[in-house]
Image: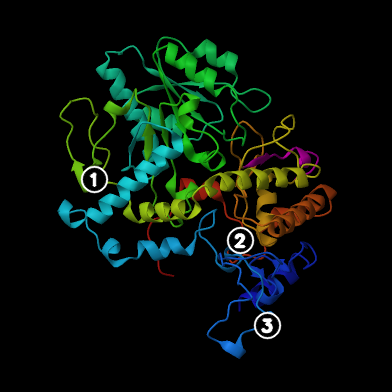
């Protein structure tokens, strides 16, 4: 029925040849090669030791002497994910262990030693990965982690009598949650400009880093997909003013295993476990956003926390020193996400460095393949980090917008990237392939993007672009009206 719907729709609007690329994909009608046709020599999803041909096995004369005929596939080709990254199946096996699955926060600590031990072990590993001093495991998501960090910063200034420190420096390209979090924590925002190469204007930062500054919120790599080279100088300047540096850890997928954030002068950073560490976060959750702290902020961090005394895990539910700002939320975070994260980290080991390396490599591969056809947001930068920012300059002589281009991608069988963000780039398209995509899938994607871009600038298909998507069950919607006037109750037709 779906194929019939698509073909009937396309026959009245867009010819089937309108979008062509390596795989015969149109809209939601994706015709992939058979699994036996996808095999590539050297691909493998499991680690199997080479067999010694001189060792006799129990099968005797039945022992195989020729190839079995199965395709060479890696696990990513076989299973799919609801997040941007590959979610190993072992994660799901671990979090479904009955004693973990049936664990309840109201049980006494002696009955949940395994669960407490899991959270404690994960906390230790995250501290080793970042080089930081302490950690709060309870925040439920990235923005919640931001709030945790900023409330800790506010508590530190309150306890130190720094009532004059009311401002937080935030780059103009920051995530929208940053200024919102800053305001919720009781601070005021002072915006720092970006340079023409998409990074923080350090001279502007120095001018605005006055004695009334409590800290700064900086994403690194930033939202333009670039590494902030002045991060250490920024940290030093803040510390000279008695301020703190919060680093938005949303983009840690480019850093893990490569650098200790403690060496960048960071005082607090949240980590999106539901993104960087492979746990699914589709359909609004669950998420997890632990926050790591420097020694300067550790005593002001929230409760509760878990400690180990001998072979027993203990919980601290109250702060007797009076330094902590209190409780961020109930309990110790999302145990299902924690279990998946720990399983991923243990499975990867030192391979976490390869994950970040491949993510950066894949983004730069996209940049190299597409930059001659689709304009790059900041062309002066030779390399990007784990995401590459394109813009609509290549469409300036057409009537086609970034939104039109993104909707056309749906007809071509691809989910559009983040568009119109960051706001410092006009008509932005932010692409993040992560480490999970193979060269074959990236080549397929690039071929499609080049084809769509070529059609867009030809001036012959404007009307088709304005009407995309044509091959999706739901057509173009008035997104502005939908946001302003949402229908929140179901009305039976």
Mark found first going from the N terminus, 1 or 2: 1
**CA distance for labels 1 and 2:** 42 Å
Q: Secondary structure at mark 3?
A: loop
- Residue 420, magenta (yes or no): no
Specify whether residue 490 is in view: no
Q: Is residue 426 left or right of residue 294?
A: right
Which residue is under mark 3? 65
**Label whose residue precedes the other's in the sequence (3 or 1):** 3
Residue 470 visible in the shown view: yes
Q: Pointers 3 and 1 in contact (CB under 8 A)?
A: no
| 114 in relation to 219, above or below | below
Residue 188's label in the rendered image is none
Please give the name of the residue rendered at 60% of the width and 19% of the height, measured from the top-left corner.
201
- Figure quadrant of residue 159: top left
Residue highlighted by disc 1: 330
Please give the count of numbered marks on the rendered protein: 3
> In this view of the protein, which residue sits in the foreground, 477 or 360?
360
The residue located at (42%, 52%) in the rendering is 341
Nearest to viewer (mark 1 / mark 2): 1
Residue 389 lies in the magenta stretch: yes
Relative side of 299 to 220, left or right:
left
Other residues around mark 2 within 10 Å, as few (<14) / some (14–19) / many (≥20): few
Pick out the residue farthest to the bottom. Answer: 61
What residue is pinned by disc 2?
A: 475
In the rendered view of the protein, which quadrant contains the C terminus?
bottom left
Query: What percent of the width, then of the height, locates residue 457?
Result: 82, 47
Q: Residues within 10 Å of mark 3 (few under 14, many from 20)?
A: few
Residue range of the region highlighted in magenta in the rendering: 387-399
Q: Is residue 99 above or below residue 242?
A: below
Pointer 1: residues within 10 angstroms few (<14), some, or many (20+)? few
First reached walking from the N terminus: tag 3 or tag 2: 3
Q: Give the CA distance from mark 3 to mark 2.
A: 55 Å
């Amino acid at each position: 029925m779906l194929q019939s719907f698509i073909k009937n729709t396309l026959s009245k609007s867009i010819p089937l040849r309108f979008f062509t690329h390596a795989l015969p994909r149109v809209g939601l009608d994706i015709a992939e090669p058979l699994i036996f046709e996808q095999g590539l020599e050297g691909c493998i999803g499991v680690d199997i030791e080479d067999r010694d041909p001189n060792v006799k096995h129990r099968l005797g004369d039945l022992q195989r002497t020729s190839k079995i005929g199965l395709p060479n596939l890696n696990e990513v080709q076989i299973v799919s994910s609801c997040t941007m990254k590959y979610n190993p199946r072992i994660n799901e096996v671990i979090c479904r262990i009955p004693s973990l699955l049936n664990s309840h926060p109201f049980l006494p600590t002696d009955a949940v030693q395994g669960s407490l031990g899991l959270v404690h072990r994960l906390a230790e590993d995250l501290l080793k990965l970042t080089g930081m001093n302490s950690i709060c495991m309870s925040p439920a998501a990235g923005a919640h982690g931001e709030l945790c960090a900023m409330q800790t910063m506010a508590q530190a200034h309150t306890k130190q009598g720094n009532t004059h420190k009311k401002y937080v420096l935030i780059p103009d390209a920051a995530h929208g949650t940053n200024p919102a979090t800053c305001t919720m924590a009781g601070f005021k925002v002072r915006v720092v400009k970006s340079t023409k190469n998409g990074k923080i204007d350090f001279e502007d930062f120095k001018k605005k880093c006055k004695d009334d500054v409590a800290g700064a919120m900086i994403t690194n790599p930033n939202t333009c997909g670039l590494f902030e080279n002045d991060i250490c100088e920024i940290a030093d300047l803040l510390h000279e003013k008695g301020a703190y540096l919060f680093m938005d850890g949303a983009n840690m997928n480019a850093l893990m295993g490569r650098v200790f954030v403690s060496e960048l002068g960071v005082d607090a950073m949240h980590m999106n476990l539901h993104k960087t560490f492979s746990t699914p976060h589709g359909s609004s959750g669950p998420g997890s956003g632990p926050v790591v702290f420097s020694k300067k902020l550790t005593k002001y961090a929230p409760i509760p926390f878990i400690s180990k005394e001998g072979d027993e895990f203990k919980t601290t539910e109250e702060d007797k020193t009076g330094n902590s700002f209190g409780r961020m939320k109930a309990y110790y975070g999302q145990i299902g996400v924690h279990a998946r994260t720990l399983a991923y980290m243990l499975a990867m080991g030192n391979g976490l460095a390869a994950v970040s390396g491949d993510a950066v490599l894949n983004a730069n591969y996209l940049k190299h393949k597409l930059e001659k056809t689709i304009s790059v947001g900041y062309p002066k930068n030779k390399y990007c980090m784990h995401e590459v920012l394109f813009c609509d300059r290549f469409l300036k002589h057409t009537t086609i917008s970034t939104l039109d281009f993104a909707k056309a991608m749906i007809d071509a069988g691809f989910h559009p990237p983040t568009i119109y963000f960051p706001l410092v780039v006009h008509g932005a398209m932010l692409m993040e392939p992560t480490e999970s995509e193979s060269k074959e899938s990236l080549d397929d994607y690039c071929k499609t993007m080049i084809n769509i871009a070529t059609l867009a600038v030809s001036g012959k298909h404007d009307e088709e672009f304005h009407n995309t998507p044509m091959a999706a069950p739901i057509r173009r919607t008035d997104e502005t009206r939908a946001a302003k006037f949402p229908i929140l109750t179901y009305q039976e037709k």
